[in-house]
Amino acid sequence: MIPKKRSVRLWFRNILRTCTYIYVNSSSYIEAAKEKSGGTSMEIGISTFVETTPDVVTGEVISHAQRLREVVEEIVLADQVGLDVFGVGEHHRKDYAASSPALVLAAAAPQTKWIRLTSAVTVLSSADPVRVFQDFATLDGISNGRAEIMAGRGSFIESFPLFGYDLDEYDELFDEKLELLLTLRESEKVTWRGGKHRPAINNLGVYPRPVQQPLPVWIGSGGNTESVIRAGLLGLPLVLAIIGGRPTQFAPLVQMYKKAAAQAGHDVSKLPVASHSHGFVGEDTEGAADKFFPSTQASMNVIGRERGWGHYSRASFDAARSLEGALYVGDAETVAQKIIHLRKNVGITRFMLHCPLGTMPHGDVMRSIELLGSEVAPRVRKEIARWEAEGEPQE
Amino acid sequence: MIPKKRSVRLWFRNILRTCTYIYVNSSSYIEAAKEKSGGTSMEIGISTFVETTPDVVTGEVISHAQRLREVVEEIVLADQVGLDVFGVGEHHRKDYAASSPALVLAAAAPQTKWIRLTSAVTVLSSADPVRVFQDFATLDGISNGRAEIMAGRGSFIESFPLFGYDLDEYDELFDEKLELLLTLRESEKVTWRGGKHRPAINNLGVYPRPVQQPLPVWIGSGGNTESVIRAGLLGLPLVLAIIGGRPTQFAPLVQMYKKAAAQAGHDVSKLPVASHSHGFVGEDTEGAADKFFPSTQASMNVIGRERGWGHYSRASFDAARSLEGALYVGDAETVAQKIIHLRKNVGITRFMLHCPLGTMPHGDVMRSIELLGSEVAPRVRKEIARWEAEGEPQE
């Protein structure tokens, strides 16, 4: 099951010592999350890439500044309506306003009380892990222990030439930077061997110190088998981007992740698994779909053109709204049922609704967040609590 | 007057095209500051290094997290009492909690309306200027146009080994990084030659875009003649750290800066000059001195041991509190008279009170900020407005 590739083994050996340490954290983290989510191990939240694509109806392009300020309001509201987590993505393109997720999260932190604040993702491959750690340790201090790093290779590649990295070293860069990032969590004084892309550190302190020990680091994955297995071996929480196809197709991947984790000695029952999917909650299902479709189509076509996907049609949009599809669009009951389905059939313990996709009116986004927190999350928590009490089937 | 050294000339040539651009900004900036400061060109604010040195009385060491949250409250209060600017320094040591000034400032930004938010300083030499620009452009968006970068070489040197830089290249690093930072301000799409310490950028966009065009970049200097002249040649606003000796001794340096600026074609009357000095405002002068002395002594002795200074005595502390000294400690009237003296005799147009120095009770720091905004600043503004209306002597 586990690939025997030399690179994986070497890399695994290098950071094996980290595993026990992280295992302890995962356990305590999921217990805390359970307590917060009314006894269930299900967290529900929002993620955004802070898009500034032209408004599909008016053609208006909102400034980066205005969208950034709107997102701060969205995070504050998400906290007020009881959502568990808010994620902000890192991009380096004109149609996205956030290249510094930690900064956007920090802006909301003092006005929030409970919500966890995470990148979604931090493009670790093109970053300096020390700066990433410092930024999120600062956020952890300001939020009193609510910061998380979601480390990813980046599905967008603009940051590589901008920071002078070679895309041919895509995997190697991530491996090296993740190794350092995990080393940084182990102790205040850091010694690191140095790599091809980052100089060594010889017994130096890294500050500020985070509140959480260690600062949570999740691995963001688009579903690449090798990256999922690595996350499992390391006992690191996993986030899957599920933005197409049937979410249940990801169940074998989650199983593979858990097998890898078990093989490396981690307690699988304590490992959180998150998903990130597009969606929108409205007053009624068809109205929500009509509101969400235009900007979704526009965004998927822009990305589709860059990646050679076909045209995004209303038919494929509507198909993806079914219980088995990857779009979480509709009234509260519809979206709740889909999240419950995901929890029961794929084993997802944290669901993140990417909303909006592209540019939607701020008021609509705020209402969707309000409904997710006040209407969707209670339904999901109630059903999952009942299901868990009855004895959720163990894989 | 201006050194003819080849390095200065070459560097100057490389960024000459930036000058006209910056000149336009400096003019509009100082006009806006004048409007905000009740018609005078005098700004008053606070700066902090977010120290976490042991409490001199109790021995208690506050956590980085707690001190970070206190500083966010201090920034919010500074805005409420009408101060013009708040600065946060960057350090990479156990006794300082802020290695990411932009993050700390961002945390306060949504709860503030008017105050300008600046690093004090950003250790540019060991940073990636693209990340610095992005962080402060994000802060500029969140604060709707109130972000500033104060770029410095760093009087502390911990960041150099941490990020793999050689202290032997102290000046060269700063020059190269500043060149890139100024290039980043000029246009959305950036082309930069590449240097010894940072790869080239070939016509790539850098996002988010700031509100201010361009984003203000000040040069922080400890009083090094060459750095002051360079700032003048570039038409960049200057911040002088005046933490010892007689502040009026800095007058010739300010003249030198202005002469360099004039020689390069900048309108000297529009160029702001800031100072950064230690101090504390209390209800009465002797009480303020007694409160401020212990942590000041402790801090000055720690830094003094590292830099080979002599023991810091109460006698030298008290001497520095005189009108001619560099400590701004006392009741509102005393501190106001010292700031007025500095404005009239040295030409400082922005005064930043570094408070606290080391660790003081949060409540005392809050009260000092309140007094600076509500009692000191109005006195200074009134007198400077009168003096300017009468026709401030032009150098």
Image: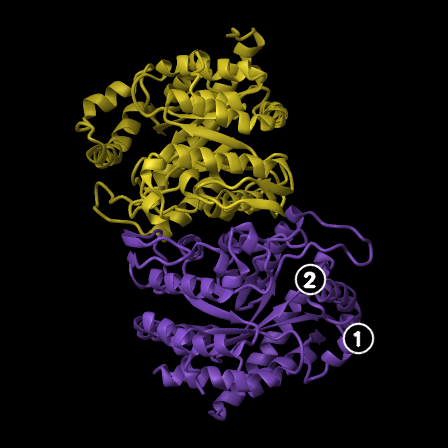
Chain colours: A purple, B yellow
Relative horizontal placement of residue A72, taking residue B299 as reference (left or right): right
Query: Compared with residue B267, is residue B35 higher up or lower down, i.e. above or below?
Result: below
Q: Quadrant of residue B248?
A: top left
Task: In the rendered structure, find residue A365 and report the number of the disc placed on it.
Answer: 2
Circle 2: residue type = Val
Label total for image: 2
* Mark 1 and mark 2: Cα distance apart in space: 16 Å
Q: Residue B10 at what x, y percent from top left?
A: 49, 25
Dot label at residue A245: none
Q: Quadrant of residue B184?
A: top right
Which of the marked residues, 1 or 2, is nearer the chain's N terminus? 1
- Seen in the picture, residue B310 relative to B169 is either above or below; the reply is above
User: Circle 2 sits in a helix, a strand or a loop, which is it?
Assistant: helix
User: Please, what is the three-letter code of the amino acid marked with disc 1?
Assistant: Glu
**In the foreground, A131 or A140:** A131
Q: Residue at x 37, y 85 (%)?
A: A263
Element under label 1?
Answer: helix
- The image shows residue B335, relative to residue A351, as above or below, that is above
Q: Report in which chain the residue with disc 1 lies.
A: A
**Location of residue B213 (image quadrant):** top right
Measured from the top left, where is residue B13 in percent x and y?
Answer: 54, 25
Residue A35 drawn at (x, y percent): 44, 75
**Residue depicted at x 55% and y 46%:** B134
Q: Which residue is mark 1?
A: A286
